[in-house]
Amino acid sequence: MIPFASAEDVQLLFPDNNVSSKPIIEFRARDAKLDGGQIGGHAFVFLGREYDNGNTVFDVAAGFFPKVGEGLVGLKRFAITPGKVDYTILDIHSDVIFRLNISTSQEEKVKEIIKKYNEKDFGAFYRNCVTMTKEIADALGLVVPFSALDFGQEMPGVFIRQLKGNNDQDAPLRFEKKQIDDALERQRKLDGAAAEKKRKEAELAAAAAFFAQQRFLAEQEQARAAAAQAQAAAQAKAMQEQREQLAAQQQLLRTQEEAARKAAAEQEAVRQAAFVAEQRKRIEAERAAAAAKGYGGNGGGTFTPAPVFGPP
């Protein structure tokens, strides 16, 4: 097998015998077994060409696996883990095969789906090997078994057998009316349950948004109250500082005034002392002059000095 090789490259294996070819796909499955291998079974697809000489060459063998470990054993089947598209030696054997001729455009579509699954996660009840084969069958326009409520149809062997029964050339191409009606009714129930779930989710989201808005408003109010309290405290502190500064200025003015009064008093005392000293000098000078002119003493005259007044 040559995974993802082109049909033209495969045709080169038989250059003399093959003139034309047509794409084919095989849906395959192995049933669940307890003697090793994949316990739950496995569903996968073969993609290839059917040549006019009767030869069939497959260039793609693709099944969806978990990327970790080999096989689907133990808890690995139930964990959601990165997936990969691959094939194993076990894929040589199949318990059920459903072959179809497809167009080249359908062939490319199948390859695109296979390539896309290399980027998906794997989980037994989340996305598994049946999921990929189901998507491929749906893309090809096949009648896919309805299995949303029936776990048995998710078993690989059961699913491929039902897919073959719904679409084989010897079987009807569509479900009978009752099967379709039952499937549509189950789908309506699922849609109703999904709608109710979405409604409840929307209500919960709206309630969560409302409580979040109320919490936001309360936090804003608390922030405003805290800011107002901080502003009031800052204003009170500023007013206290202004009062203290004013008191300090007033005390400084009183100190300066007291110093000025003290300095003026000292200056006045000095001026008065100087005036008195000057008056005394003048009186003494007048006495000396009078004595020199014969007043007082042996001359018999009397000298009366001018009165001493305070400074003008």
Image (cartoon, rainbow, N blue to C red):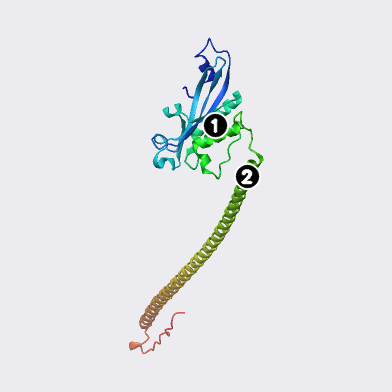
Q: Secondary structure at mark 1?
A: helix
Residue 289 sits in quarter: bottom left
The answer to whether residue 25 is left or right of residue 250 is right
Say if mark 2 contacts mark 1, CB within 8 Å: no
Q: Looking at the image, which residue sits at the far top?
A: 16
Residue 180 appears in the figure: yes
Alpha carbon distance from label 2 to label 1: 29 Å
**Along the line of sight, the residue nearer the viewer: 311 or 151:** 151
Residue 255: horizontal and vertical position, in percent?
42, 73
The answer to whether residue 165 is left or right of residue 75 is right
Q: Label 1 sits on what residue type? A: Ile
Q: Label 2 sits on what residue type? A: Asp
Residue 167 sits in quarter: top right
Residue 149: horizontal and vertical position, in percent?
55, 45
Give the crowd class for mark 2: few <14, some 14-19, many >=20 residues within 10 Å: few
**Along the line of sight, the residue nearer the viewer: 236 or 189:** 189
Above or below — where is 13 with respect to 283? above
Residue that label 1 marks: 113
Give residue 182's mark.
2
